[in-house]
Amino acid sequence: QVQLVQSGAEVKKPGASVKVSCKASGYTFINYGITWVRQAPGQGLEWMGSISGYNGDTNYAQNLQGRVTMTTDTSASTAYMELRSLRSDDTAVYYCARGSYNHDYWGQGTLVTVSS
Amino acid sequence: QSALTQPASVSGSPGQSITISCTGTSGDVGGYNYVSWYQQHPGKAPKLMIYDVSNRPSGVSDRFSGSKSGNTASLTISGLQAEDEADYYCNSYTSNTAQVFGGGTKLTVL
């Protein structure tokens, strides 16, 4: 069965970086993209960007350009999302999801807390 | 990219039907048939309910249906059940190869 398993919760100070992993299983990794979505406490979903599982091509949300990098390790069927220069308003649950457009399987979410 | 516009809340009684709207522009909802809908229960990851405007993934009840007219997409839930109470989000592909979510709608089953 398809599963996306994300890394554990993180607490970071403002200005630091965080890297969240998303390990995929149960399907051929290179056949699907991975999309990252975040949700601040009590707020809605925000699309962060997508990466092709095939060739690593990326599309990032305009408001995160320059601070976010998405990568994949196809040998490990794992996707990564790194966010730099963290601010308090980056505190959120970060999800990975299968697919570049329609997201049929989701990870369990990773809580990233940014606090001094 | 501005979020798509959804009503903050809708409600209905068990057995009734409700419709949630999702309004965008010709650069997103109106320009592409890549509108999807997600259901999210508290503390859980979102679940895909409708994709490509009106298609249901395997395992999703046929009580859920989607449609689009112009710049507005809609999700209809018929025969409301208690377990349908959740937050619902629309999502659309956009003209700059990005995506955008709606602000979310809280469905209350009375």
Image (cartoon, helix red, strand yellow):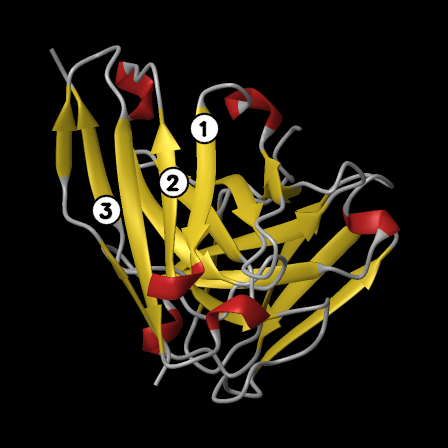
Residue on which disc 3 sits: A110
Q: Is residue B6 above or below residue B54?
A: above
- Do we see residue A40 in this rendering? yes
Q: Position of residue A56 (x, y in %)?
A: 57, 49
Instruction: Please give the chain letter of the residue carrying mark 3.
Output: A
- The quadrant in which the C terminus of chain A is found is top left
Dot 3 crowding, Cα within 10 Å, few <14, some 14–19, many 20+: many
- Can residue A77 be seen here? The reply is no
Image height of B4 relative to A16, above or below: below
Q: Which mark is residue A68?
A: 1
Residue A33, numbered circle = none
Q: Earlier in the sequence, mark 3 or mark 1?
A: 1
Q: Quadrant of residue B27?
A: top right
Q: Which residue is mark 2?
A: A81
Q: Percent x, y for residue A67?
A: 45, 21
Q: Residues within 10 Å of mark 2 (few under 14, many from 20)?
A: many
Q: Is residue A94 left or right of residue B94?
A: left
What's the chain of the residue with tag 2?
A
In the figure, B56 relative to B9: above or below?
Answer: below
Please name the amino acid that badge 2 sits on: Met
Q: Is tag 1's residue or tag 2's residue first in the polypeptide sequence?
A: 1
Query: Of residues B52 and A23, which is closer to you in this image?
Result: A23
Specify the amino acid type for callout 3. Thr
Q: Using the numbered discs, state the Cα–Cα distance from disc 2 to disc 3 in whole angstroms.
A: 11 Å
